Amino acid sequence: MNKTKEIWIAGFALFSLFFGAGNLILPPNLGVKAGVDWWVVVLGFILTAIAIPILAIFAHARLQGTLYDFGKKVSPAFSTLFCFLIYIIAVAIPSPRTAAVTHEMAIQPFFDTPAILTSIVYFVLVFLFAINRSKIISLIGKFLTPIIVLILLVIIGISFFTSTGNLGVSTFKNPFIDGLLEGYQTFDAIAGVVVGAVIIISLDYSNHTTFNEKRKLIRKAGYIAGTGLLLIYGGLILSGALFATTFAETASRIDVLSGLSTQTLGNFGTTFLSILVALACFTTAVGIVTGTADYIKGICNNSKTAYIITAAVCAIIGIIVGSYNVGFIIDVAVPALMFLYPITIMLILLNIVPDKYASKLVFRGVILVTFIFSITDFLGFIIPRENLIGIKSIIPLAEHSLGWVLPALLVFVGLNLKRK
């Protein structure tokens, strides 16, 4: 196959593996709330929903191993625990959420069927795709992603020409921070460390078996996926801002996305959106289940049986959790995200800097400090926030749930200066 064509197929596949439920329902709602500050929200959102995830792909291109390799410099025990938590959360929250979104937006408007039935059919198909993993890149990159992108571009394009152009007042106190934290909900940093391994292992089934060949292809595919995500996210956020006055203050994320599609595509809006949601969500679920099964297969001496059993277990968990409504799943996800996201982000960053700046000591110091200073962010979504006002007032950026950022940076710089 032509090299350029392979790069584009891999880039489209990567885009599609990233682009799931949260990526669809979050940006338009951000735009509605941001109003005139939509571009500031875009800057924050793309930092955690595009930049960090694509850097995770670059880290995978450099490591060309598994998720375990991201944390092994801290310690084998830490890396094993980190992998366990990442995969448990991935199969228990973002993967099932794709089924819940598919039911509420693609099935419920047309059929009076229970959510559990949608979830069963959905994850049976996910399982079938996962056990035919050698075809994943080709199927997703060649066929599914172009359809997803086309429908999105139509919605975004029409919104530019049919809206009044009047932008409302922002309801955000700090648009950049709100956009950044909402980017957590895409789960894309976690997706980056999970599906990046899927791309690498899938390439092993092709003729790209050398380290450098895979590294170049993965990096170029990452640029393509990142550019696509930037255009789509920015367009959806701006579209939400342009139509903000047409939505009630109490409109949910799904209400906003549904309303936007109806206003831009008319009576066919619901049908087009249903196809888009089903495709976008499905490809992400396939990526998560496949990535998890790959990891378990790797620690079980490349056992094909272990791979199939893991994929089946992931599908069963997806069926159960996916039968709940989207709002509930999003609410449950927040504490887990505030706990794991800071550590995941720092592991990604540490794995892309030159080795001379990322010794074992630096890894251990930065990750330890990140964990300690993110505890208040995690607890803030479990216990009343007023109980944490005292400690948050003395930690820079803690009031924005980013109290770990400066301490982690200072430790990174300090340990490297000490080395010199």
Image (spheres, rainbow, N blue to C red):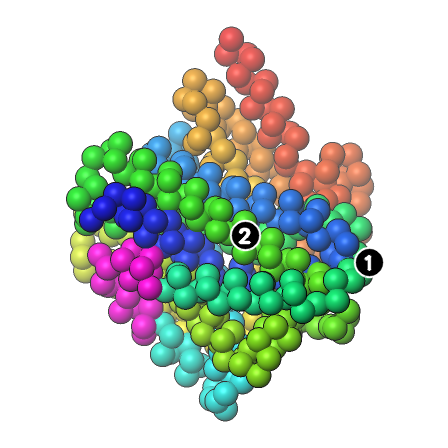
| Residue at the (25%, 35%) spot, across then down | 213
- Measured as percent of width and height from the top left, residue 306 is found at 23, 58
The residue mark sitting in front, 1 or 2, is 2
Label 1 sits on a secondary structure element that is: loop
- Main SS of the magenta segment? helix
- Measured as percent of width and height from the top left, residue 212 is found at 26, 32
- Measured as percent of width and height from the top left, residue 178 is found at 70, 51
- Looking at numbered disc 2 in the image, what kind of residue is underneath it? Leu
Q: Nearer the viewer, residue 141 or 200?
A: 141
| Residue at the (56%, 71%) spot, across then down | 326
- The quadrant holding residue 285 is bottom left
Depicted 209 relative to depicted 29: above or below: above
- First to last magenta residue range: 124-143
For the image shown, how many numbered marks are present on the structure?
A: 2
Depicted 419 relative to depicted 157: above or below: above
Q: Which mark is residue 169?
A: 1
- Give the mark nearest the N terminus, 1 or 2: 1
Q: Is residue 383 magenta?
A: no
Q: Nearer the viewer, residue 191 or 23?
A: 23
Task: Say whether residue 132 is visible.
Answer: yes
| Residue at the (53%, 81%) spot, across then down | 268
Label 2 sits on a secondary structure element that is: helix
Which residue is disc 2 drawn over?
231
What is the spatial separation of the Cα atoms under label 1 and label 2, in whole angstroms?
Answer: 23 Å
| Residue at the (18%, 57%) spot, across then down | 304
Q: Is residue 132 magenta?
A: yes
- Measured as percent of width and height from the top left, residue 359 is found at 43, 21
